[in-house]
Image (tube, grey):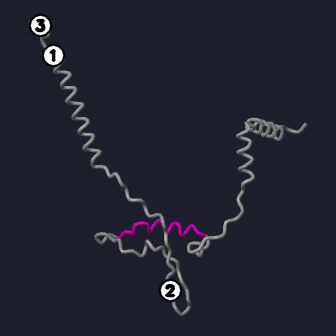
Amino acid sequence: MWTEPVGRKPAWTHRRWMACCRTLACVASLLMLGGCATDLESADDSVDYLQLRDDPSTGAARTVPAACTGADNIAGRARLPLGCANALNLQRMVQDTGDLHRGQAMGPTLAAPVGRAAQQYLLGETADLERRRELERERLAAPAP
């Protein structure tokens, strides 16, 4: 009868132990992944602004983000409602607050420089152009005789 050397476990117990470890690792990872949300709510990126009349007699109005008028104050904490700080920052970046209610007309596009750059890239002329620019810079930087 064949016996294992003293102090060593049989090979089949080692293989069985490794199989159990792999199974436990797979089960643990599946349990962790099971707790993950599969459908996340999409953030509401729309920012609406309201015009509030300060004084009806003068007709003075101020623009306030709609997100700042909500009552999302949880447990009495002094916090801004969700989206309010972002809307206020966007409002401060605008030069004309009327643009928050109606946008400006778009101007002409600058397609010619973009088209030239794309054409030079596609035709492989960018290396030539860079070499010409470098030579021009060296010529301008050289001291006059």
Q: Nearer the viewer, mark 1 or mark 2?
A: 1
Q: CA distance from mark 2 to mark 3?
A: 98 Å
Q: Nearer the viewer, residue 46 or 55?
A: 46
**Label 2 amino acid?**
Asp
Residue that sits furthest to the left in the current view: 1
Tell me residue 123's x, y (percent). Answer: 74, 38
Q: Are marks 2 and 3 in contact (CB under 8 Å)?
A: no
Q: Earlier in the sequence, mark 3 or mark 1?
A: 3
Residue 142, by quadrant, is: top right
Q: Earlier in the sequence, mark 2 or mark 3?
A: 3
The disc placed on residue 54 is 2
**Label 3 amino acid?**
Trp
Q: Is residue 81 above or below residue 3?
A: below
Q: Is residue 45 above or below residue 16?
A: below
Quadrant of the drawing holding the C terminus: top right
Q: Nearer the viewer, residue 71 or 145?
A: 71
Tell me residue 131's x, y (percent). Answer: 77, 35
The disc placed on residue 10 is 1
Q: Which residue is at a point 57% across and 67% down the rendered structure image?
A: 93
Q: CA distance from mark 3 to mark 1?
A: 11 Å
Q: Is residue 119 above or below residue 88?
A: above
Q: Tell me if 141 is positioned left or right of 27 in this view.
A: right
What stretch of residues is rendered in magenta?
A: 78-94
Q: Which residue is at a point 49% across and 76% down the rendered structure image?
A: 64
> Which residue position holds label 3?
2
Q: Which residue is at a point 56% across and 75% down the rendered structure image?
A: 101
Tell me residue 79's x, y (percent). Answer: 37, 69
**Label 1 amino acid?**
Pro
